Image (cartoon, grey):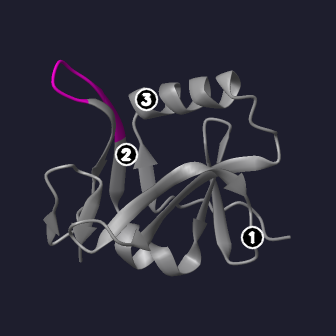
Amino acid sequence: MPATTEITPVTLTNGALTQLKRIREEQNIPDDHGLRIGVKGGGCSGFSYVLGFDLKTDNDDEFEFEGLKVFMQKSHAIYLLGMEIDWVDGLNNRGFSFNNPNASSTCGCGTSFSA
């Protein structure tokens, strides 16, 4: 089994980490699951972000943020390298936000993009 990757292709802010750890605890996510970050086709701009807890697959890179295992399919790095995931808790918006330097355009909803 390969070791955990030292260089992380994406970053999680403290706010995002706090919320993800809270969700993991409240939903009793098993220890063998990690946070999956990825993309899938769809959404109003071409791609949508994937963010949820899942098991590791053979095609995944693994890295860690303060004890939180993160899995990302190797082929998704081209779309996600340098992305920051944050937690927004404001009057007009509440949820995870994705600051992706690889996106040539984004949708108004903030969860889809084109590259």
Disc 1 crowd rating (10 Å Cα; few below 14, some 14-19, many 20+) is few
Rendered image quadrant of residue 28: top right
Q: Which residue type does callout 3 highlight?
A: Asn
Question: Which of the numbered marks, if any, corresponds to residue 57?
Answer: 1
Residue beneath disc 2: 85
Query: Residue 39: x, y in percent?
Result: 43, 68
Magenta span includes 85: no
Q: Is residue 20 left or right of residue 81?
A: right
Identify the residue at horizontal 44%, vertical 71% (top origin).
40
Residue 96 versus residue 23 in the image, above or below: below
Residue beneath disc 3: 14
In the image, the segment drawn in magenta is: 86-93
Magenta span includes 87: yes
- Nearer to us in this view, 97 or 102: 97
Query: Residue 4: x, y in percent?
Result: 71, 60
Q: Which residue type does callout 2 highlight?
A: Ile
